[in-house]
Amino acid sequence: MNSIVYTVIISFFCLTRLLTAAQCPTERGPLTVWLADATNCQADEAHCNRFGLDYVCSEEIVNPHPNATCQVGVKALCSFPPIPSSLVETPANTFKQLAYNVWELRYLYYQIGQRERTCRIIPETFRRHPDLDAIIFNEAFMGGCIAGFNLSYSGEKLTFRDILHEYGFKYITATIGNPPTPRKFENGGIFIASKWPILEEDNVIYEATQPLTADDLSQKGASYAKIQKTVGSMSRVYHVLGTHLQATDNIGSDNVRRNQAREMHGLMLSKNIPPHEPVIYGGDLNADRFSDLAADIFEILDASMPVIVGDQNYTKDKTINDIYDGKGSQKWIDYVLYSNAHLQPSKLATVQVVIPKTDDPFGVCLDEVRVWPRPLFADNPRCRKTKNITDLADHFAVMGHFQYEEDVTVDVTPTHPPTPPVVATTIDPAGINVQPGFPIYRCGLMMPRTAMPTRPTALITD
């Protein structure tokens, strides 16, 4: 009798799993991802919501990769929310440039809510500023949102590039310093995303660096994008350079930053940019705007800072950023500048500190210096400090607004095609890459499996 009851229970359990699996779509949308790393290995709607994602369905974890966080349990299919508002098109002779240090350091040494924050950055930025033309990203070391954070990562990905592409920013430069080298095993964390075609891209890895610092292990440098904005019959070319200068405050750090600025200026000069085309610089210069260092960098670049508008006076303000405890330093160290040696704005150029943030608080682990190879979420007992926050990075973003004369340039066929979105990836238990549509079996039924080969990501830190 007991064996009959046991058989009935097992059959019911398997049938329940099959019915649950059948509820999951066989064809997935462009911004969906399987998450199988909940703290209790029971991923559900709350686990998707933890990252600002929508919940689709759940399934039993079957045949996990040996390196997977959860070997048994339940995984959840999550989808990225629709774009909060349509992007706004502005005249070709105007350009809005954002620079944003997104604070996405490696998990190995830092637990700072990287995934929870960065999954929200792009929708919250576009919700407030749908008329942006280009974005310079700093400290996007892992790639943003659901990213591969080390070589052992075996789950699916949903990165900044996937999200930007779907939202309409289809032209994206390579991240500086990918792939890493034995000497510098972290990338530079810098790339430029554009709503308009990128005709040419280039970058330089800085030779100037400070030995025995974390930055010395990172391939920091400058990224260049030649962007063609065309609206109606008017077309204009913009030259954008993004960077992140030396981060330390040691003896000699200021001179390293000056020399790095010279290298970025050299990259610009190598492009032989006509004087009738605008050049825009942006990024985290790690130089307070009231300092002699900032003045020196502006002089090296032969660049000017636009007029400051808005209510905020600092790009890193620990007194109002709720990631912090309401006390600490206030600095303006992030910039968008324009070159004095090239086309000048015809009207007053402005720069404004903007604060992408959520309306509702969300929980993160803020155990900043913690050696742990995987994400720790706020409900994990290993996390020593948790906090509910609305701010999305330790820096605020800066937005430059430029307007130029309404002359028309000749249309040029883009040589930099739209950056294709990266399909969510996985690896089968044997470590063999699985192609889209390769069948897998659950409770005796064959089901489609959507996957693409993974691309390894180095286990490195800032």
Image: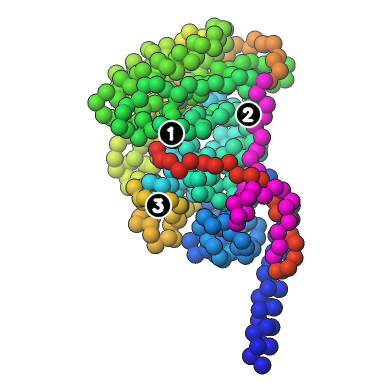
Q: Residue at x 55, y 17 (%)?
A: 239
Label 3: which secondary element: loop
Task: Identify which amino acid the numbered label 2 is placed on.
Answer: Tyr
From the top left corner, tell me how far across and down residue 150 is, in percent. 48, 45
**Looking at the picture, does residue 57 appear above or below residue 224?**
below
Q: Is residue 62 left or right of residue 51?
A: right
Task: Identify which amino acid the numbered label 3 is placed on.
Answer: Trp
Q: Which residues are magenta?
A: 415-442
Q: Residue at x 73, y 56 (%)?
A: 439
Say which of marks 1 and 3 sits in front: 1
* Residue that numbered label 2 is attached to: 171
* Residue that numbered label 1 is attached to: 182
Q: Mark on residue 372?
A: 3
Q: Mark on residue 318?
A: none
Q: Residue furthest bottom?
A: 1
Label 1: which secondary element: loop
Count of picture labels: 3
Crowdedness near tag 2: few (<14), some (14–19) or many (≥20) residues, C-alpha within 10 Å: many
Of 426 and 337, nearer the camera is 426
From the top left corner, tell me how far across and down residue 299 is, in percent. 38, 12
Quarter of the image for residue 26 reads bottom right
